[in-house]
Image (cartoon, rainbow, N blue to C red):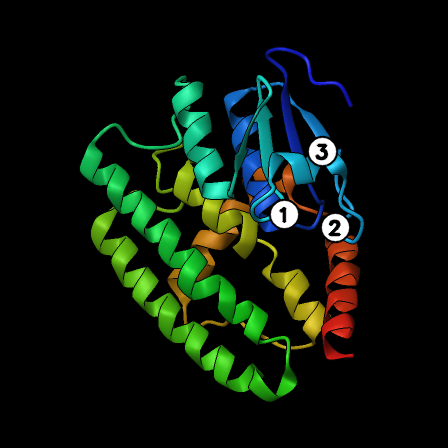
Amino acid sequence: MEEKQGEVVLFGTWASNPCTRVELALKLKGIPYKYVEEDLKNKSELLLRHNPVYKKVPVLVHNGKSIAESLIILEYIEECWNTTPKLLPEDPHQRAKVRFWANYYDQKVVPIFHRAKGKEEREKAIEDLSQVLKVFEEGIEKDFPGQNPFFNGESLGYLGISIGSHGCNYKAVHEAMDAVLLSEKNPKFLSWVHALMNCPLMEETLPPHDKLVAGIRVWLNSTQA
């Protein structure tokens, strides 16, 4: 595939939450882009060339230069296309808090979903998830009072995209695992996720529910084999 000057190319996979993040940001900003679906069992030479360190998606290529890691890509998009709607607030302290909680979600919440794939670990994982989400709920309420559920005024932003691209798929996870990971023990978080799910851009960008359920089941079976 030839790369043209000024062209924006996203290398991704349809079921990847981090890739969905980047697509949401590009669409929100109205940035035209070319999407390249990668087969992670048979990675393309282009992907390996653009991300030789981690060798994974997402990778954004802009003007022939590559950027890896979804949160870093979101920041690049905000800095390179500094137009409305903004992904991050103008105030440096507010920006830092947004980054902090997005990082907390990635470091504390997301790994628990992976732990829950094993039935023997699931009960403890569900308990741990409730606790880390409680901390998240309290922190968000303290740091962003009145800004829920998008945490960015009336528009999706860095934090809403970071949470929604993963959390909005929880029903598919429940169906595939035949288990309830998210419950009313975390009502605020669930209310935020449901509001994000109702956002038209989120709805059009998330993977199809049934396809995702089937994909998660394949992943579960492969990891349990």
Give me the C-alpha separation between circle 1 and circle 2. 8 Å
- Do callouts 1 and 2 mark residues in contact (Cβ within 8 Å)? yes
Give the vertical position of 192 relative to 31 (above or below).
Answer: below
The residue wearing badge 3 is: 46
Q: Considering depth in this image, is 34 or 145 the residue closer to the camera?
A: 34
Give me the C-alpha separation between circle 1 and circle 3. 11 Å
What kind of element bears circle 2?
loop
At x 55%, y 19%, the residue is 30
Amino acid at pointer 2: Leu
What kind of element bears circle 3?
helix
Amino acid at pointer 3: Leu
Q: Earlier in the sequence, mark 1 or mark 3?
A: 3
The residue wearing badge 1 is: 56
Q: Is residue 80 left or right of residue 146?
A: right
Front label number (3 vs 2): 3
At x 64%, y 31%, the residue is 10
**Residue 70 pos. (x, y %):** 51, 42
Q: Earlier in the sequence, mark 1 or mark 2?
A: 2
At x 36%, y 58%, the residue is 104
Q: Which mark is residue 40?
A: 2
Examine the image and state in which quarter residue 150 appears: top left
Front label number (1 vs 3): 3
Q: Earlier in the sequence, mark 3 or mark 2?
A: 2
At x 77%, y 39%, the residue is 44
At label 1, counting other C-alpha atoms closer than 10 Å, the crowd grade (few under 14, some 14-19, many 20 or more) is some
Res. 182 visible in picture: no
Q: Quadrant of the N terminus?
A: top right
At label 3, counting other C-alpha atoms closer than 10 Å, the crowd grade (few under 14, some 14-19, many 20 or more) is few
Q: Quadrant of the C terminus?
A: bottom right
Give me the C-alpha separation between circle 3 and circle 2. 12 Å
